[in-house]
Amino acid sequence: MTSTGVHTILGQSGLKRFAELDQNNKVQVMYVWIDGSGEHCRCKTKTVDFEPTEASQLPVWNFDGSSTGQAVGKNSDVFIKPVALFRDPLRGGKNKLVLCEAFNYEMKPVATNKRATCMAAMEKCKDQKPWFGIEQEYTLLDLDGYPLGWPKGGFPQPQGPYYCGVGGGRVVGREVVEAHYRACLYAGIKIAGTNAEVMPAQWEFQIGPCEGIEEGDHLWMARFLLARICEEAGIIASLDPKPIPGDWNGAGAHCNFSTECMRQENGLPAIEEAVDKLSKRHDYHIRMYDPNEGRDNERRLTGAHETSDIHTFSAGVANRGCSIRIPRQCSADKKGYLEDRRPSSNCDPYSVTEAMITTCCF
Ligand code: ADP
Ligand code: MN
Ligand code: MN
Ligand code: MN
């Protein structure tokens, strides 16, 4: 798909003119949900005549599920229920973004609604105050699907200067990363930071620490904003875990995790106990760590490029070739958190955090 040229018809200043018109006391709410791929968002807007302060004040809505891989045409209505409210950095003012859960005609969660079971599990262990921090890696692509800034049909210089890089020829797409960072802060998303990654055109942002269900809510809305800003920039943010085969790093979504017990003085035994439990359920976690039950992650978790091999569980202090890494600082402090390096960049954070507490907290 190529650019429509809308911008050249209206011009940047022309678009701004309409955005600045007053809204006649109406508020625009962008309903956002996860589609049938389990990896992409869809959205549509509703006008309301009040400024909502909580998601629950907004009405349940519906959409045509037969167009998103979530229902059949004969019985196509899928319901979307608002669950997490954010300020809208694109429209500004009183306008909102609202993340929704999707339900079928019997009000049962659709297949890609992983939030419902996650929420139930979080509820059961909330006394342990589980915290998460997910590191979302992604790759910027041109609309032709080739990495942004790469010589067409060719390759850049080998990896080395790009991770946390600075300078022409070393990083590409920083404008988008900066715009996304500010958009997340404005929205009220708990974004912890950003950095350029090992492969050129690959980047990372982190969401956390968040307690319980909030991790999935905030990460999904941050992904929505990334897609939306890339749409304006005329590029693509890919969550493919291995966009370029060969000697190029893949993209993951490391999940940092702790309970209150792990964070307190001498929490290290609690961390070690969690690692031991994780070691016994490797296959379950691999199935929960990408939308295709491990098949996407197979291309990435090779044992090379700072990954562990998909078939083998391993853990170590400061070791980036392991399934689980205990950060050096946590080992020294004898408290803190662990990092699960296995989740794929296209994972559903609700599935990842649910798996984590199911194994470690029950
Ligand atoms: P890395 O060194 O692996 O690149 P990052 O700095 O990118 O790590 O990400 C670490 C993430 O862990 C951040 O999102 C941070 O908020 C989160 N984090 C920090 N402390 C904790 C904790 N106690 N429990 C869970 N997550 C945490
Ligand atoms: Mn990181
Ligand atoms: Mn990283
Ligand atoms: Mn990490």
Image: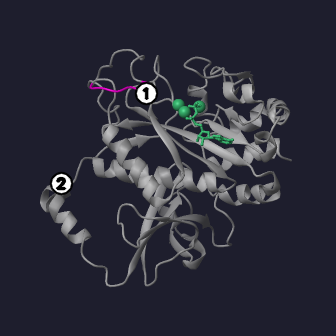
Give the colouring mode of the picture.
Answer: one colour
199 left or right, relative to 324: left
Tell me the kind of residue under disc 1.
Answer: Cys
| Disc 2 CB within 8 Å of nearest ligand 3 atom | no
Asked whether 97 or 9 is in front, the reply is 97
In the displayed structure, would residue 344 be above or below residue 218? above
Q: Is residue 57 left or right of residue 361?
A: left
Q: Tell me: residue 8, above or below residue 265.
A: below
Q: Magenta region: which residues?
A: 163-168
* Whole-percent x, y for residue 137 in the image: 50, 36
Nearest-to-viewer mark from 2 and 1: 1
- Picture quadrant where residue 202 is located: top left
How crowded pointer 2 is (Cα within 10 Å; few <14, some 14-19, many 20+) is rated as few
Residue 229 placement (x, y as % from top left) = 35, 51
Foreground pick, 275 / 82? 275
Overall secondary structure of the magenta section: loop
Q: Where in the figure is residue 2, as x and y percent of width and height?
A: 25, 47
Q: Which residue is mark 1?
A: 164
Q: Secondary structure at mark 1?
A: loop
Residue beneath disc 2? 5
- Amino acid, disc 2: Gly
Whether disc 1's CB lies below 8 Å from ligand 3 is answered: no
